[in-house]
Amino acid sequence: MTKSAFHDILNRRHWIFDLDGTLTVAIHDFAAIRRTLGVPDGRDILEHLAWLPEGEALSAERKLAEIEAELAERTEPAVGALQLVRTLNEKGAKLGVLTRNTRDNALNTLRRIGVLPYLAPEDVLGRDEAPAKPDPGGILKLARAWRIEPSAAVMVGDYAFDLKTGRAAGAATIHVDPSGAFRWPELADLSVHTLAELAAALPPAGG
């Protein structure tokens, strides 16, 4: 990537974040959640629940929401999350969250980690407000609300679903991976170990 392209992404004024594992420290044990819900190994949880008979689906969805609510009470901010969100807010950027969690859990989590004051609640989209990632519908919805082209936005996430969502919408993509494995280089425009690293790379206001 050229230096100008790098700065173009960091200078953008519309940022969309995944929640769990991106703005927060990753604590979800998806294998255990699958076992609890009876989801086959390797199967997407939300996709599996969508194919269940209505009564089974409602019961499984309630159980999933309970698990997520319990996890939300234990979550902690990812390294640099508050610094990055605060800096972007000071630069006048619009900020959104797109999560496969529920919106209520997302709002509780954002409040717990201290970043909710920097977000408009209507810009927090859960699985009931937008199609689940990797469908690009959530980014497209935020882009319409912000009156921008999706290509003007940045999608930040820790997993392939986030990056695929950004790619499908035409947004720039940033992969956050504390392990440094960066497993999907073809899906990421930028890759960083932490949000603190990203915050430090932001140009100064007016830069």
Image (spheres, rainbow, N blue to C red):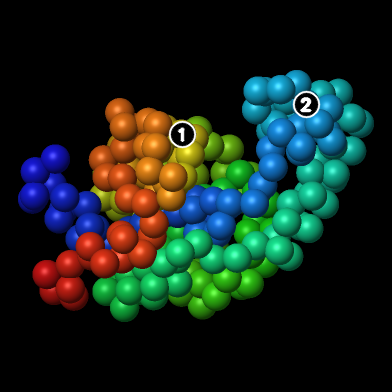
Structural crowding at the residue carrying mark 1, measured as other residues with C-alpha within 10 Å and reported as few (<14), some (14–19) or many (≥20): some
**Image quadrant where residue 114 sits:** bottom right
The residue pinned by badge 2 equals 39
The residue pinned by badge 1 equals 160
Coordinates of residue 149 in the picture (x, y in percent): 29, 47
**Res. 204 mark:** none
Q: CA distance from mark 1 to mark 2?
A: 20 Å
* Quadrant, the C terminus: bottom left
* Quadrant, the N terminus: top left
Query: Is 123 displayed left or right of 46 in the figure?
Result: left
First along the sequence among labels 1 and 2: 2
Query: Is 4 displayed left or right of 34 in the figure?
Result: left
Structural crowding at the residue carrying mark 2, measured as other residues with C-alpha within 10 Å and reported as few (<14), some (14–19) or many (≥20): some
> Is the C-beta separation of discs 1 and 2 under 8 Å?
no
Q: Tell me which residue sits at (48%, 39%) in the image.
A: 159
Q: Is residue 146 visible?
A: no
Coordinates of residue 146 in the picture (x, y in percent): 37, 58
Q: Which of the pair 205/145 is nearer the observer? A: 205
Q: Which of the pair 51/190 is nearer the observer? A: 190
Query: Is 113 displayed left or right of 161 in the figure?
Result: right
Q: Is 121 placed above or below 182 here?
A: below
Q: Secondary structure at mark 2?
A: loop
Residue type at the position of mark 2: Val
Number of labels in the image equals 2
Q: Is residue 73 visible?
A: yes
Residue type at the position of mark 1: Ala
Q: Tell me which residue sits at (69%, 42%) in the image.
A: 29
Coordinates of residue 72 in the picture (x, y in percent): 70, 60
Q: Is 184 placed above or below 87 here?
A: above
Coordinates of residue 74 in the picture (x, y in percent): 71, 63
Q: Tell me which residue sits at (85%, 44%) in the image.
A: 63
Query: Is 144 displayed left or right of 40 in the figure?
Result: left
